[in-house]
Image (tube, rainbow, N blue to C red):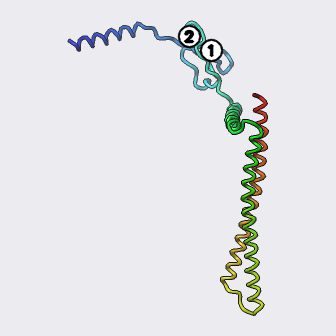
Amino acid sequence: MRLRGSVYAVFVLAILASNTSVAVEYYRYSDERGITVISRQGVPSHLIGNGYEVLSEQGRVVRVVPRAPTPEEYRKMQAEKEQAKTDRQLLMLYTRVEDVDRARDRKVADIDGQISIARGNLLSTNSLRADLQGQAAAHERAGRAVPAQLLKQIEDATVDEQRLQQQIANYLKRKTETKQAFALDKQRVTELLLKK
């Protein structure tokens, strides 16, 4: 008896579903010649990128599908989105222009500290190499061959000097780049705060 009732319920639902009218949609778009077309078939795939409108049976616009952006417009939209993201991050970091200056000064002071350490190490290495070269000269003046270990130490000290000089040059370059980056941030934060 329960099975018969279920079959009856499904039958009634099927009849009700067949009586409900399915909403008909029309598509309005421009074809290759610029002529406006209204079709129930849909928009041809090669014209979808131009945009179209979906109309109800009564001819009212149900939804508008805008045209796809050109590659140049898309690049511009992406750049604007990226700029907006960067701007939000800047405003989260810096609430005032002075905050940019303080952050720059901290970063530059940190780099200056690294430069000072590298310069101190370079002075020590220069002094060590000079001492080692003095020892090698003493051996030569005495008519003895310079020991291989001493020559190796002089070579190592020379390599260390070159490495430290390169390190200092890199720090100085990073200091310049940091100042330039903070100058750009400061300019942008100033512009954003003026818009508020």
Crowding at mark 2 (Cα within 10 Å: few <14, some 14-19, many 20+): some
Looking at the image, which residue is at 72% across and 50% down?
Answer: 107
Residue indicated by mark 1: 37
Looking at the image, which residue is at 20% across and 11% down?
Answer: 1
Q: Is residue 75 visible?
A: no
Residue 174 horizontal side relative to residue 39, left or right: right
- How far, Cα to Cα, is label 1 from label 2? 15 Å
**Residue 189 spot, x, y in % from top left:** 76, 36
Q: Is residue 73 above or below residue 57?
A: below
Residue indicated by mark 2: 56
Comparing 170 with 49, the one in front is: 170
Furthest residue toward left: 1
Comparing 185 with 23, the one in front is: 185
Q: Secondary structure at mark 1?
A: strand
Residue 79 horizontal side relative to residue 13, left or right: right
Comparing 102 with 92, the one in front is: 102
Residue 87: image quadrant is top right
Residue 157 horizontal side relative to residue 21, left or right: right
Comparing 41 with 148, the one in front is: 148
Q: Is residue 70 above or below residue 181?
A: above
